Amino acid sequence: MLKFVRRTKVGTFVSNYPVSYLGELLEWFVGKFLGDVLHLEVMMGVKMSSLDNGGDVDLLSRIGTKLIAIECKESPPNNVPVSEMQAILFRKTKIKPDIFIFLIDTTLSVKRNILDNLMWIIRSKYRKMHQGVYEFDNKLFVVSAKRSLLRNLEVAIREGINGLWCY
């Protein structure tokens, strides 16, 4: 198991990695939540040969036979260019998950840059499900840290699996 932080003798926590590893730390944190709290199977940093343009899938998880893919971003919404969102959506089309979550660790508004750009790219509107949780067609969710990143992630997963089960 990776040790991202260590406890000092006085009880404080210190990072074992430089600041440039914040993306991996966020992925680890979200993966730990999925596994420890929601009791889901989780894989991190999954490389796939079908991803011609490179890159990886930050987190893959599943509920029964339903696949969940999560892309994590720790940068402010204005620092996520359209080209990066297009690459993320390309990975979504290659993986074909039942639920795809674009998770952004920010309390800043995601409307202007993230939501509006996604609407332009996929030609689809979104609906606000909860503060910090937005859903596009085809079980594509955008989750931000408004109020609570982990609570919002849980809302997106619960809403995403709603309607996927056939009895």
Image (tube, rainbow, N blue to C red):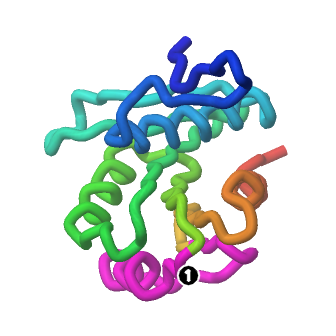
Quarter of the C terminus within the rendering: top right
Q: From the viewer's perspective, is residue 96 above or below residue 143?
A: above
Q: Please indicate whether residue 148 sits to the left or right of residue 98 in the image.
A: right
In this rendering, is residue 151 above or below 5? below
Q: Say what amino acid the circle numbered 1 marks.
A: Tyr
Q: Nearer the viewer, residue 102 or 89?
A: 102
- Can the viewer see residue 123? no
Q: Is residue 113 magenta?
A: yes
Q: Residue at x 79, y 36 (%)?
A: 38
Residue 78 appears at what percent x and percent y?
34, 76
| Residue wearing tag 1 | 126
Is residue 74 found inside the magenta-colored segment of the image? no
Residue at 41% across, 43% down: 23
Residue 30 seen in the figure: yes
Q: Position of residue 147 (x, y in %)?
A: 74, 68
**Quadrant location of the N terminus in the rendered image:** top right
Where residue 60 appears, x then y in whole percent?
Answer: 52, 35
Q: Foreground residue, 56 or 14?
A: 14
Q: Secondary structure at mark 1?
A: loop
Above or below for 4 versus 121: above
The correct choice, above or below, for 22 with respect to 10 in the image is below
| Viewer-closest of 127 and 83 | 83
- Label 1 Cα neighbours within 10 Å, binned few <14 / some 14-19 / many ≥20: some
Task: Determine which quarter of the picture holds residue 101.
Answer: bottom right
Report x, y in % for residue 40.
71, 30
Q: Give the residues in magenta.
A: 108-135
Query: Which residue is outermost to the front?
Result: 10
- Please give the name of the residue rendered at 58% of the width and 52% of the height, measured from the top-left corner: 99
At x 35%, y 52%, the residue is: 93
